[in-house]
Amino acid sequence: MKFCKFIYKFIMKVVETVKELRQALSGEKNRGKTVGFVPTMGALHRGHLSLVQRCKKECGVAVVSIFVNPTQFNDRGDLARYPRTLAADVQLLQVAGCDVAFAPSEKEVYPEPDVRVFDFGQLDKVMEGAHRPGHFNGVAQVVSRLFDLVKPDYAYFGEKDFQQLAVVGEMVRQLRLPVKLVRCPIVREADGLALSSRNALLTPEQRAAAPLIAKTLFAAVDMVCSADLAALKRFVADAINASEQLQLEYFEVVCASTLQPVASLDDDCAKQACIAVRVGKVRLIDNVRLS
Ligand code: PAF
């Protein structure tokens, strides 16, 4: 870390404390620059870097946080296993055009335990919210805290975490935060697998099986005019569970704005198909617009 800090001192600022972050940003804000922000948990891949590049293109100063937020993990094993690659992340951020990388400790983000409980109505009662109790409360805690520290004009989020975007949007609305959320498309490997930091945890056999998730979603898109909802769900469950490496956790077709499951494929709303699959101990999610 010290080595990276030395190397990039004159190019990209790497800061670890709130005080350093404020110092790094005060000059930029005084010069009237718009502040763009990309919150991450590190283990950066091309998906993250596409957010950073867009942020840099659209804003005067690009800030990226790297913080593995413990309050959003409902599974201690998942938190312990989460990949941590700070030195490599810092190098990638430099190349992507980041101006300030903020890599705080837990104490810096949470000087006192965050006991806030958010109410997102039905938005977080389905899919990830239902399968990972407390997850979105933790996401809202850390994102609101980071927004408070960085005070961005724009914040960039990937659509792979489709439900997270809806929940953060609702949090911004409820807290009346002066930040505009920018939705960015999913970035995929050539074989279709959605980029995720968790992909790094897959064994070669699991990695070879994982593209079936996207392939099945794309096949579901092709079926949408000729199948009903029950047939679509059966098709997806059978296709995923046919692989020895994969186990379907859920597949839902939801209304893209409310995230509530549709009763029929004829429901009059933009529909998103969302999936979570267990690949050994790793959990992968993906989604696609159905119609
Ligand atoms: O999407 C993520 O990586 C995390 O949920 C986020 C938004 C950085 C909050 O910890």
Image: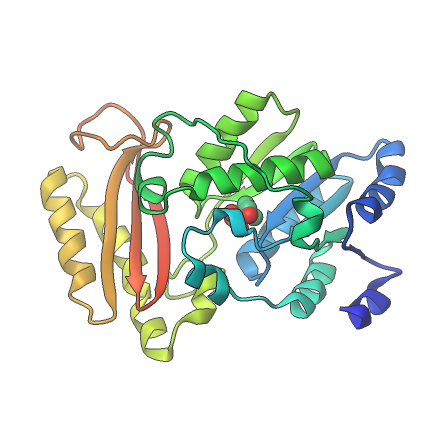
Near-viewer residue (116 or 22): 116
Near-viewer residue (288 or 135): 135
Q: Which x, y percent locates residue 139?
A: 51, 42
Which residue in the rendered view is the most extreme toward the bottom? Answer: 204
Q: Which x, y percent locates residue 281?
A: 34, 66
Q: Is residue 168 above or below residue 245?
A: above
Query: Image check: 195 left or right of 25?
Result: left
Near-viewer residue (195 or 114): 114
Which residue is pictured at 37% across the width and 34% down the height? 124
Which quarter shows the N terminus? bottom right
| Colour style of the rendered protein structure | rainbow
Which residue is pictured at 34% across the width and 27% down the height? 122
Query: Image check: 196 left or right of 222?
Result: right
- Residue 35 seen in the figure: yes
Which residue is pictured at 63% across the width and 25% down the height? 177
Q: Which x, y percent locates residue 157?
A: 54, 43
Quadrant in the rendering for residue 105? bottom right
- Residue 226 seen in the figure: no
Quadrant in the rendering for residue 148? top right
Which quarter shows the C terminus? top left
Q: Is residue 171 above or below residue 273?
A: above
Q: Which x, y percent locates residue 191?
A: 37, 66
Q: Is residue 38 above or below residue 247?
A: above
